[in-house]
Amino acid sequence: MQSAAPVTSPNNSAECEIRTNPVQNIVSGNKSDSAVYAHLLMTQKRGYPLWRPKDDDPRLPDIYKQTGVHIGDVGILDQFGGFDYLFNVCHPADHPLNEGRVPENFKLLEIDYTDIKESPQEFKPSSYVESKPSHISKTVLSGQPLPYRVPQEVGAGLSFSSSATSGALLILPEGGKRIDHQQLSMFYDYAVECAQSWYAHVNEPMARGVHNGALYLVTGFDKARAWGVASFIDANPGTVSLDFVPGALSNVGGHPTYWFSKHNCASASSDADNVFGNQSGCVFLRGFKIAVRHNPFTNIPKFCSSVKYISDLDVEELFPKPKMVSNFSTWYSISQQPNHTPWMPSNECSVLPNHVCLYLII
């Protein structure tokens, strides 16, 4: 993935001076590119925006490398703005997606996997999603003939400018698709049943040290073959400008690449599936955020559940938290002490003491 730090024009360095901005307080001082990008673009209500839509980990299953995020994936949002895949609940334990990954006593979610709503052309070529409509303008660059397979709508490239002091931008030069599963209640009930075993699996044998509320169950997504992402904060009005242009083909007869030839006063990154040519980059992720809490006063295995739209939550609750150093057994036993629940913030959920919390991400 091509990535770069904010660029300061040598001739206009004063224009890019950092200034105090209220957005800084909103993201609790976390001014990482991915945090700013996610916070600002979530206002579009398309799900969680991934700064890194495609995971390039060579240890992932081959089928995952080819197609990316699947419906039924359980995973974690990582600190780099990507989705850390763990296992898939809609496929059996011996499926290529799940071999060596599922929890002990894994139970398959028996669901009609084809009951989906799909929009193959959700995004047209040269589409873009901005954090605030009308704050970012686009023009098509004129110039040399179009490289092979580059959409006509892209031309010689796309130029963006903004009058805002903060913003986020997703560019889809070849468009993209949207897929959502329709049986959300099935996923909901299944997650309520399995949530505790998932956290035990992730924090014991996998030793990930994740906080409560870190697991996500995917029920929908937006995907693209090629993309560009950008974010900026504390910029002087009118100083942000970006040029997103096609590059050389990845190989003979292959697919075009795209990159930011200019990104003044903004952080930017671009990538594409040039290996398989699939729409495998997940630019928006939808589903459930899962949290659990144990009742220290009873051993009765009774659960209640709460489902809330992401718009009703503090956006900071979705950001990745630092991992813990203690294992699951340690902090799970501590959490059973009265008035001591270190693995869950007091405002994480507000229903009964012994419950699983599920937040719907839309």
Image: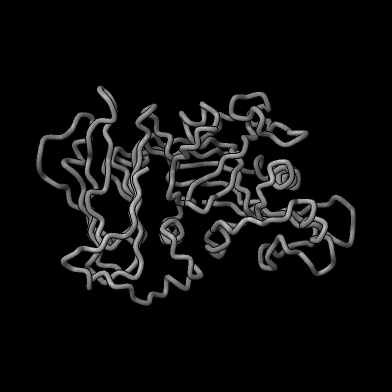
* Whether residue 169 is visible: no
Q: In the rendered image, which quarter is residue 341 located in?
A: bottom right
Q: Looking at the picture, tell me which residue is in the foreground, 351 or 182.
A: 351
Residue shown at the point (65%, 51%) measured from the top left: 290
Q: Indicate the position of residue 14 as horizontal and vertical percent values.
A: 22, 73
Q: Indicate the position of residue 358 as horizontal and vertical percent values.
A: 65, 52
Q: As drawn, which residue projects farthest toward the bottom?
A: 20
Quadrant occupied by the N terminus: top left
Residue shown at the point (71%, 60%) measured from the top left: 343
- Total labels: the figure holds 0
Q: How is the image coloured?
A: one colour
Q: In this view, does 264 lie to the left or right of 32?
A: left
Q: Indicate the position of residue 70 as horizontal and vertical percent values.
A: 53, 35
Above or below — where is 275 with respect to 178? above
* Whether residue 166 is visible: yes
Residue shown at the point (75%, 51%) measured from the top left: 328
Above or below — where is 88 with respect to 269? above
Above or below — where is 201 with respect to 317? above
Above or below — where is 66 with respect to 24? above
Q: In the rendered image, which quarter is residue 275 located in?
A: top left
Q: Indicate the position of residue 210 as horizontal and vertical percent values.
A: 65, 52
Q: Looking at the picture, tell me which residue is in the foreground, 73 or 19.
A: 19
Q: Is residue 88 left or right of residue 241?
A: right
Residue shown at the point (46%, 59%) measured from the top left: 35
